[in-house]
Amino acid sequence: MAAGNGSVARWLASRVGREGRVVATDLNPRFLAGHGLPNLEVRRHNILEDELEAAHFDLVHCRALLMHLPDPIRGLGRLLNAVRPGGWLLIEEADGSGSFGAADPGHPRAAGFNRRSRAVWTALKAAGIMDLDFGRRLPPLFDELGVRDLGHEGVALAARGRDPLAQFLQMTDELIRERLIAAGVLTERDFDELAQAYDDRSFWFVNFTLFAAWGRRAG
């Protein structure tokens, strides 16, 4: 679900063999076109609105999907409903409120970077665009849904200016820049300072934590 550029879907297709089948879904599956894999089916699909086979799949997986939904709990329930009894559900979601920030508080950019980043995450959550407190909720949500053999972990990575992760976050800021400036969340100078931090090789930061939870659907 929310297959993005299809890296996980293609890997799964290579693992299930000729007799297996992988279904990759996304609101806009443009990056999945022309994959050339006979055991990979691509669907345009909205998890909150479109039908999905019930109790059908051996494994259901998504990454960074629920945190973007207006009703993530309903989305999680629908994903679990698609798992066959005894099958596996694996969900990965980001959480930035606890880990994201400058790695060295003594760096000249640290205080401003932390303040501006927190303002961005808070505004995105308030606007219903992205909930960067959601990842940590996965284990208790799985427990409430009665998932068996529950496992979970969280991983946070450090990066520095001009790393691929810094470039990704810099591009993300550009996408939301005008909207948040218009809303009075940050100024043009604030976004310029964030961009300069992401371009500074001396500046290290800790990324959001990627939480994962997995388990079996009860029979």
Image (cartoon, rainbow, N blue to C red):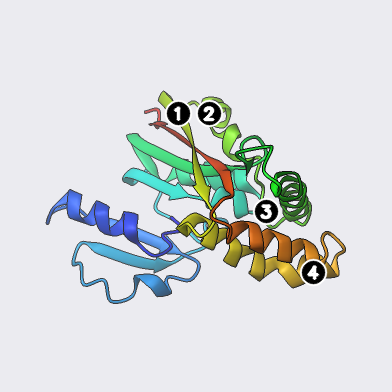
Q: Secondary structure at mark 2?
A: helix
**Residue 62 percent across, percent down from the top left:** 44, 49
According to the picture, the residue beneath numbered tag 2 turns out to be 139
Residue type at mark 4? Answer: Glu
Q: Sequence-wise, which precedes: disc 2 or disc 1?
A: 2
Q: Which mark is residue 77?
A: none
Instruction: Determine contact: label 2, label 1, CB under 8 Å.
Output: yes
Q: Is residue 105 above or below residue 139?
A: below
* Residue shown at the point (20%, 62%) measured from the top left: 39
Task: State the separation of the CA atoms marked 2 and 1.
Answer: 7 Å
* Residue shown at the point (75%, 44%) measured from the top left: 111
Q: How many other residues sit within 10 Å of disc 2, few (<14), some (14-19) or many (≥20)?
A: many
Quadrant where the C terminus sits is top left
Q: Secondary structure at mark 3?
A: loop
Residue type at mark 3? Answer: Pro
According to the picture, the residue beneath numbered tag 4 turns out to be 188
Q: Which mark is residue 152?
A: 1
Q: Sequence-wise, which precedes: disc 1 or disc 4?
A: 1
According to the picture, the residue beneath numbered tag 3 turns out to be 70
**Residue 85 percent across, percent down from the top left:** 35, 34
Task: State the separation of the CA atoms marked 1 and 4.
Answer: 40 Å
Q: Sequence-wise, which precedes: disc 2 or disc 4?
A: 2
Q: Sequence-wise, which precedes: disc 3 or disc 1?
A: 3
Task: State the separation of the CA atoms marked 4 and 3.
Answer: 29 Å
